[in-house]
Image (tube, rainbow, N blue to C red):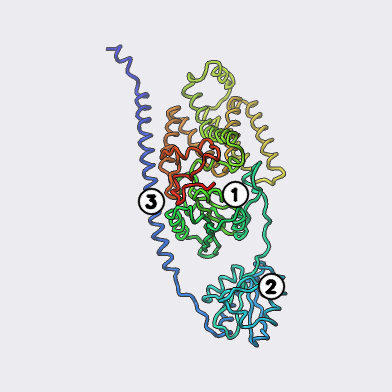
Amino acid sequence: MSLILSYIPDWGVFGQAFLAFLIPVAACSMYKRMYTFVGQRKNRDSGSTSKTEQSKQRPPRPFSGNYNDDLRTIREVIGESDDFHCREFVMQRLNANASLFYIDGMQNDRMLNLKIMEFLMFEATAENLDSKEKAGPALPFRNLKEAQNLDDFNRSVLFGHAGLLVEGLAGGLLIELPSGQSRSITEPVSEALLRGPRLGFSEVLSENTSLLRRQGFCDQMVIKSYRVGSELQKDLALAYMKDIVNPDLLKEVEERISQMDMDFMADSGYVEQLIEDNYLSPFQQVQNTERPDRVINAMMEGRIGILLDGSPFALIVPATFSMLLQSPEDYYERWLPSSLLRTLRFAAAFLALMAPSLYISFISFHPGLIPTELALSIIETRQGVPFPPLIEVLILEVSIEVLREAGIRLPKPIGPAMGIVGGLIIGDAAVQAGIVSPFLVIVIAVTAISSFSIPTYSAGITLRLLRFVGMLFAAFLGMFGTILFFLLLCSHLTKLKSFGVPYLTPVSPFRIRDWKDLFVRAPLSLMKRRPLMLKTQNTKRKR
């Protein structure tokens, strides 16, 4: 009997087994609750958005037809700003009083004060002010249109048009002028390439849409404009290929754009967060880029580009996980070196996510899985280290993250130098002080370098965040926790979608034909069809 009892494990082993069973059950339960919460929140938000829109709807104020009354109303509404100007003058050929409204810096002031004012005062006739006809080549302005009401007139003036109010006309006229000063087109900062176009988006929407047009002549490219923001409004544009894009995808994007409810869209990051499928997921479901060539290539596959005025970052939807590890340079180089580099990126992403967790698992729970000579070397280097592996890894990881953030926030001349010197000094000092082992410094260095190889900065942030979660799993459950963390991550990615497209496509669901552009990049001559997951109207690439 005693022999039988000796083979029965103590209560601690049973407790660990129960805990190992309980954690996956709890994780699955939380996972389901998370998606239920997101679905309920979306329904509630859509309902509240519709109610908000209904409450904000009010009839627009029409023009009274009386010149003095309309002039007084316009000044009361937008005349308090110091950058607002109203020039009253007399149109001699019409023998009528008129007022020109404009905002400082929103148009070419020299053209406005010299050519346009001179034309309106001395040369303009009733035929010139007919808004049904576009401005001809002899006129000093590009386009002329009639405002539907006073609200539309005031809004257009604040957006950069010059507003013209003429005595005797029932409404107001809007003169379209070239915009004011803007930043010159430069090379993208966040996406460096050795080979490829050196053009990057700027903060002016019209310049960004023109960059897309300049990529090539195409009569199928459509750019739709929207106004976003309830208090401070901005222009937003959707860009897509009419003969390629999936109509259902286009309809879904338009609906999400129309349901956005924010006072002000400071950057395209606001749009990204408001239109994504699951805001509780750490993975980005909308890709951002500064490169026009990346947007054009995505549009040729059937995706949709989103551009916001005032932001140099365009958005691409739908996005998949493989897109985050692909670079435009993969298609500019020959397929063999491009495939090698892409495979290295996938391996680097795995190391950036799992290397610290594997280190903790092997050192704390499974040293027998390490080769004997390497295990003895690691034990020797850890002699005198006062902390367990988790604390040891956290010290170095947090230090690296702080140095990385400091290098980004510091001025450019000293930021990179501070990051390199700080990393060397802290790592060497930590080893000399016996706080961390030299082997761990190598592991953390490989992890940091691997995270730098990810082309998309936002994707690198996600892996850095999840790396800490994986370290906690490994510290409590060892290799079982590391594998459990990886499986939970895979199950989340399998269920995640971006505008109806599975995030792990073409891995899950499995589509072998789309594997030509996944881990390796097949020769261009073999990539004759567009991705199946996008369900495009035209599946063949024209060559």
Occupied quadrant, residue 424: top right
Between the C-alphas of marks 1 and 3, the distance is 35 Å
Q: Secondary structure at mark 3?
A: helix
Disc 2 marks which residue?
112
**Residue 19: x percent and y percent?**
37, 31
Q: Is residue 104 above or below residue 68?
A: above
Q: Image quadrant for the N terminus? A: top left
Side of 403 where 171 appears, left or right: left
Q: Secondary structure at mark 1?
A: helix
Occupied quadrant, residue 58: bottom left
Side of 305 where 332 appears, left or right: right
Q: Residue furthest left?
A: 1
Disc 3 marks which residue?
39
Mark positioned earlier in the residue sequence (3 or 2):
3
Between the C-alphas of marks 2 and 1, the distance is 35 Å
Q: Amino acid at mark 1?
A: Asp
Q: Is residue 449 above or below residue 294?
A: above
In this view, the mark in front (3 or 2) = 2
Q: Amino acid at mark 2?
A: Leu
Mark positioned earlier in the residue sequence (1 or 3):
3
Cβ atoms under marks 3 and 2 closer than 8 Å: no
Mark positioned earlier in the residue sequence (2 or 1):
2
In percent of the image, x 47 and y 33: which residue is there? 472
Residue 293 numbered tag? 1
Q: Residue furthest front?
A: 543
Residue 432 numbered tag? none
Q: Amino acid at mark 3?
A: Gly
